[in-house]
Amino acid sequence: MLRFAEDGQAEPVLADGGKPMVFLTELEAQKTVTLHLLRWMNGHMRREGDVAGRAKEEANRIFRKGRMIPVERIVT
């Protein structure tokens, strides 16, 4: 189970298809929870439900030396 600051609710680690994962050993569960937690921590910085920096990208695209600069975000 993981609990994030976003909602404070404990949620199970989900497998493909959205079903909770079942682990045979405590070590296997700990490794998987750690992996999911690190992926969440190293993901996009968020600010009130929006990706941080997106407003700055939009402003730079419009106002950078009077010309439009295309900005593309790749989500992995």
Image (spheres, rainbow, N blue to C red):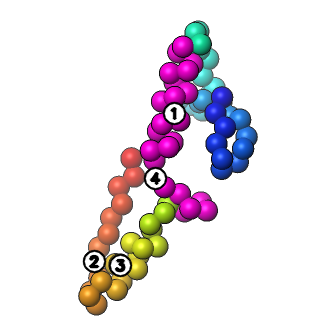
The boundaries of the magenta stretch are 27-50
**Percent of width and height locating residue 29:** 57, 19
**Percent of width and height locating residue 17:** 56, 31
Do callouts 4 and 1 mark residues in contact (Cβ within 8 Å)? no
Spatial separation of the CA atoms under disc 4 and disc 1: 14 Å
Q: Is residue 25 left or right of residue 52?
A: right
Q: Which numbered disc, 1 or 3, marks the residue that appears first in the sequence?
A: 1
- Amino acid on which disc 3 is placed: Asn
Q: Residues within 10 Å of mark 1 (few under 14, many from 20)?
A: some
> Residue 69: which disc?
2
Numbered-mark total: 4
Can residue 61 be seen at all in this image of the molecule? yes
Residue at position x 55%, y 21% in the image: 30
Residue at position x 35%, y 78% in the image: 60
**Residue under label 1:** 36
Q: Which numbered disc, 3 or 2, marks the residue that appears first in the sequence?
A: 3
Q: Residues within 10 Å of mark 2 (few under 14, many from 20)?
A: some
**Residue under label 3:** 60
Q: Quadrant of the N terminus?
A: top right
Spatial separation of the CA atoms under disc 1 and disc 3: 33 Å
